Amino acid sequence: MIPSLIIANWKMHKTIKETEAFCRDFIVLSRGIHKTTVVICPPFTALAAARACLESSNIQLGAQDMHWEDKGAYTGEVSPLQLIDAGCRYVIIGHSERRHLRGETEEMINKKITAAVAHDLIPVLCVGETLQEREAGRAGHVVALQLEKGLQNINFSAGNLVIAYEPVWAIGTGVNASGRDAGEMAALIRSCLGKLNPSGPAPKIPLLYGGSVKADNFAEFLQEDMNGALVGGASLQADSFFEIVRLSEDA
Ligand code: 13P
């Protein structure tokens, strides 16, 4: 059985003060949570504040992106070493907002995953099709290609990789994929992982669903072969995020 994992992706939201307030509230709410791993990915500017607040809890820290080099002349970038230094255990890689708004390529994503694994950071590789691709019947093909290219030459194992299926059309739109769509994609993802690493741990890699996840639709995904969620909007308030964590814990 794969332990549940719920990750908050705050994107470009929250100041230091807002981060501290969230963490204070969330720690109180989540005292009884033991089975579910909870990860918060604040903006870089709030990592230190989140780390200080979460220190005495089991809640883990993650980043929303990173560069693949350890250091160098890369203005505005943050390296794996700096993320580890800031207390991160996880890093989101290849989010569709970076693929589509920042021109991130499969090659860049592969370099980032390679660097994360080399540094013992757990990459959360985001994959997912656009609405156009889904309507053209290409969703499976697109996701398979993203996995193949993103994970090229990566020696992945159950403990060093998380895959998040985030259909682009479901992100921030309020229109979530159906549990059935997510379940079909989970099966396809596991089969791709199995082909990429035939002797490897495909059945044990945590798979998350992301895209307009809320407490009132989350149960649908838990019934499929999904092990948790990557949550955007609903992770910004401690109580709405906790509702999702609680459903995972009780499942
Ligand atoms: P929403 O939950 O706001 O749709 O965002 C999903 C997402 O992009 C998480 O990475």
Image (cartoon, rainbow, N blue to C red):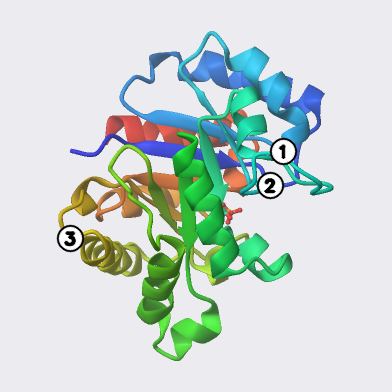
- In this rendering, position of residue 159 left or right of residue 114: left
- In this rendering, position of residue 83 left or right of residue 227: right
Instruction: Quickly name the residue at label 3.
Output: 198
Would you say the beta carbon of the disc 3 residue lies within 8 angstroms of ligand 1? no
- Packing grade of label 3 (10 A; few <14, some 14-19, many >=20) is few
Q: Is residue 70 above or below residue 137?
A: above
Q: Is residue 224 above or below residue 243?
A: below
x and y, in percent, of residue 9 in the image: 60, 43
**Amino acid type indicated by mark 3:** Pro
Whole-angstrom CA distance, mark 2 to mark 1, is: 6 Å
x and y, in percent, of residue 219 in the image: 34, 48
The answer to whether marks 2 and 1 mark residues whose Cβ atoms lie closer than 8 Å is yes
**Amino acid type indicated by mark 1:** Pro
Seen at 21% across and 48% down, the residue is 201
Would you say the beta carbon of the disc 2 residue lies within 8 angstroms of ligand 1? yes
x and y, in percent, of residue 29 in the image: 51, 19
Nearer the N terminus, badge 1 or badge 3?
Answer: 1
- Is residue 211 visible in the rendered image? The answer is no
Q: Nearer the viewer, residue 147 or 171?
A: 147
Instruction: Quickly name the residue at label 2.
Output: 11
Instruction: Quickly name the residue at label 1.
Output: 43
The answer to whether marks 1 and 3 mark residues whose Cβ atoms lie closer than 8 Å is no
Whole-angstrom CA distance, mark 2 to mark 3, is: 35 Å
As drawn, the residue found furthest toward the bottom would be: 136
Seen at 66% across and 13% down, the residue is 52
Nearer the N terminus, badge 2 or badge 1?
Answer: 2
- Packing grade of label 1 (10 A; few <14, some 14-19, many >=20) is many
